[in-house]
Amino acid sequence: MSESGPIHSGAEAADEAIRDVVEVDCCVAGGGPAGVMLSLLLARNGLKVSLLESHKDFDRDFRGDTIHPSTLDALDQIGLAEGLHQFPHGKLRSLRIHTAAGSRTLVDFHRLKTKFPYIMMLPQVHLLDYLASAAKQYSGFCLTLGANVQRLVEAGDRIVGVRYRGEDNGWHEVRAPLVIGCDGRFSKLRSLAGFECNKTSPPMDVIWFRLSRRPNDAADEGDFYIGNGHFVVMLNRQDEWQVGYVIVKGGYSQLRAEGIEQLQQSLAGMVPWVADRVDELQDWKQVSVLSVESGLVDRWYRPGLLLIGDAAHVMSPIGGVGINYAVQDAIETANLLTEPLRRGQPTLDELAAVQQRRERPTRIIQAFQRFMQRQIVSNALEDAKPFELPLPIRLISSLPWFRDLPARLVAFGPRRVHVDLALVRHGR
């Protein structure tokens, strides 16, 4: 790749010793679902791809573990769904809500027209390792772990690569016609490029922890328990329960001050069938706190750079759709940009086309999340009055046809996304 004009990557860049410079067709920063899936698809299409991940492995606790039908359908297209199902996993075939007034099915996936009418519960590390292993079958794919991207490399007004510190603490550089930022809700590339994320703070945070799963426990459902100003989410992870204890925004300090025993008692009171194991939660070190945010970047691209996934749109955990949307972003990006990357350098209009394709579905699902937050979460966290399921939710959950609408939205988003299989070019 040749460039005219001065190349720079920050005030001190000229004085730093660069240990190596690698040239590829596309540099992907961030090894989450968007980054790994995108790298796999581009490499499968015959492109040379460098995937940079700042951590030394993919194993981070309490990342999203929900793999939706849309993602499973896409993996089935490229022959990877069957292998993924060999990992021990859980299946959520419906989502139910439990209140003092009784129980209701909010979302039922059974009626979906798909080979996979369920949400697969699988630790994200297994998904990422599996996809990365599949990508390594292609000669153009290179994964670098422990690669902490620190700077953008620019030629004039165009980004032409990145500079990162490796595990050896030395500086390394990757040059590419396109850099794609997939580095999550706290995106370094978003910050380096000067993009702003218009964030909102939904009225909740989530405390995540695990409890053991017993042979006689319920299966194939995701359960929500509401009462006494609290909201608990129970997700089946095969041999354990992933428990989300939803609290008022900023309320963790007060919860912790009340003591772990109070949390145990509250959980046992709301979900009586786990009362025999709440004492497994002994220390706050077993707890992970998610500060819930939602947001959208106005513009996802500039010459030589594109943001997708949480780097472009921070998602609330409602519906567990974060992985689904990240993967859909990756698929649409590969579909739209493979040919421009084969030609050499995607134009600004070609980068804009990715945002145009993905922004509307993102706005729709974020509006749905805000609706659910107003209708259920905000009311559930008010302990001054008994919780009553709002009328719109009761209507939706009462009729199977209406219940299909949120099921399709959670499973697929506003429109289904498919891998363009005609783009594949082997043996490059």
Image: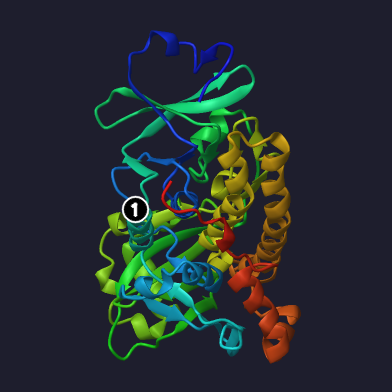
In this rendering, the answer to whether 161 lies above or below 298 is: above
Residue 330 rendering spot, x and y as whole percentages: 55, 53
Query: Pointer 1: residues within 10 angstroms few (<14), some, or many (20+)?
Result: few
Residue 155 rendering spot, x and y as whole percentages: 57, 18
The residue identified by callout 1 is 60
Q: Quadrant of residue 63?
A: bottom left
* Colour pattern of the rendering: rainbow
**Residue closest to the far front:** 427
In this rendering, the answer to whether 159 lies above or below 112 is: above
Q: Is residue 146 left or right of residue 224?
A: left
Q: Quadrant of residue 410?
A: bottom right
Q: Could you tell me how many numbered marks the image carries?
A: 1
Residue 249 visible in image: yes
Q: Secondary structure at mark 1?
A: loop
Identified at 53% across, 40% down, the residue is 181
Identified at 65% across, 63% down, the residue is 369
Q: What amino acid type should be assigned to the residue bearing mark 1?
A: Arg
